[in-house]
Amino acid sequence: MLRRRLPEARAFLGQLLGRVPEGGADASHPFRHFVERFVGGGTAPASPAPADAKSPAPARGAAGGGDPASLTVHFLRHSCGLAEADAARVAGRLRLRSTKNAHAVLAILRDTLGMPPASVTRLVAAYPAILSSTTTGARFDFYLRELGLAPAQVRRFVLASPNRFLTAGLDGRLRPNQRILRDLLGSDEKVLTAIKQSIDLIYENLEVVLLPKVQVLRDHGVTEEVLVKLITKHPKALVHRSSRFDVGLAAMEEFGVSPDSGIFPYAFGIFTKIYQSKWDRRVENYLSLGWTKEQVRQAFIRHPYCMSVSDDKVRQLMCFFSEKLGWDPECVSSSPTVLSFSYEKRVLPRYKVLDILVSRGVLKKGIRMSHLTILENNFVERYVNRYQEAIPEVLEAYGARTACAMK
């Protein structure tokens, strides 16, 4: 019976509502509001449109009462920049009941780390848990303040491996590793230097991965000074999964590199990071250019980084040295640092300047190896600034590098 009379009651109340003088009652008057809800079938009138037309979802930081799935999709789209389809997909792995923590994480990524919007979008899409973790802020604080990494370094590390970077326990892994490294290296500055070389040092299990190898090196005769240099310069030789640790120790003995020598951390570090197949290919490349195996060995002992130079670059430089300077493999292997120099930025510009000075009779003995190995400022002062007035061609030959160095 009530259902049959409901339309009549609504009509009556509608007439009653219509009698309210225009302007005589506020739209928010309780009685009017009640009548409108009753006449409308219990549906509240539409609320005024929000100021931000792009953010029609629950207010920032709203918690409870809203649909977590809807809130999550809205946040992913309008705060993180995900496309609608991507936001819906990611929301299947993430449920935000509040956006407060998520906004705080975004502030760190964008404002503190300086992460570009596109990178933030990719990071959230690949690892949405970063928004919901309540320890994310504390982790970033550890990397930035306790370790002392620069924002750009943290940004690079987190983008390279967000899962490992953000899930290692603060008190279960990160801080214990920091203490182990400080005990080994002696200072926070050296710890920071080592971590910059390999972030594995902070989130691997150092008690299992690093400390046993450290003891082997000590038993092998490696001094503490050499050990510190190895960890700070080439930590991947000790913690990287592909490191050829045992093979490297045997190779150092074969090469005649003493474990207490200053070259050991560099030779050992370079050798252990190169796969055997790649090492063999590098050796064959030198041999194809007229080197002997002994010359390759001597070059490596003098400058281990010569085995990190690409095959193409070695061929380019050896061809240039042979044709322009008349240097043979014996000459180059005695000063292998020249193989690590940039052809475009160092070797060629210096050669042009020196060739002019030779043609003018300034350099009586021609171009020597020392001309390429001396420091940049010394070269500019001795061979460019000194002769630029009498022989202005040297300034043009050296190009923009000279202009920058003289400012």
Image: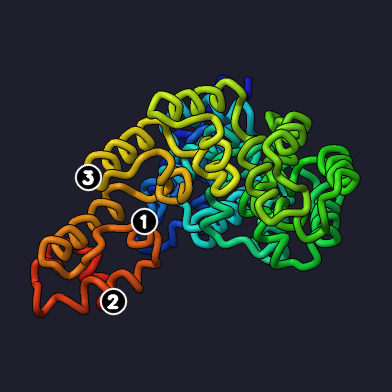
Instruction: Label 1, secondary structure: give it.
Output: helix
Q: Nearer the viewer, mark 1 or mark 2?
A: 1
Give the residue at x 81% y 66%. Answer: 186
Q: Which mark is residue 369?
A: 1
| Image position of 180 (left or right of 153) | right
What amino acid type should be assigned to the residue bearing mark 2?
Answer: Glu
* Residue 336 drawn at (x, y percent): 46, 47
Looking at the image, how many numbered discs can be counted on the residues?
Answer: 3
Mark 2 highlights which residue? 381
Q: Which mark is residue 324?
A: 3
Give the residue at x 36% y 40%. Answer: 328
Q: Earlier in the sequence, mark 2 or mark 3?
A: 3
User: Height in image: 277 above or below 44?
Assistant: above
Category of crowding for the residue at label 2, using alpha-carbon neighbours closer than 10 angstroms: few (below 14), some (14–19), many (at least 20): some
Q: Quadrant of residue 228?
A: bottom right
* Residue 221 drawn at (x, y percent): 85, 49
Give the residue at x 16% y 76%. Answer: 387
Position of the C terminus, as image quadrant, is: bottom left
What amino acid type should be assigned to the residue bearing mark 1?
Answer: Met
Position of the N terminus, as image quadrant, is: top right
Q: Nearer the viewer, residue 348 or 245?
A: 348
Disc 3 to disc 1, how far (Cα)? 13 Å
Q: Earlier in the sequence, mark 1 or mark 2?
A: 1
Instruction: Label 2, secondary structure: give it.
Output: helix
Q: Are marks 2 and 3 in contact (CB under 8 Å)?
A: no
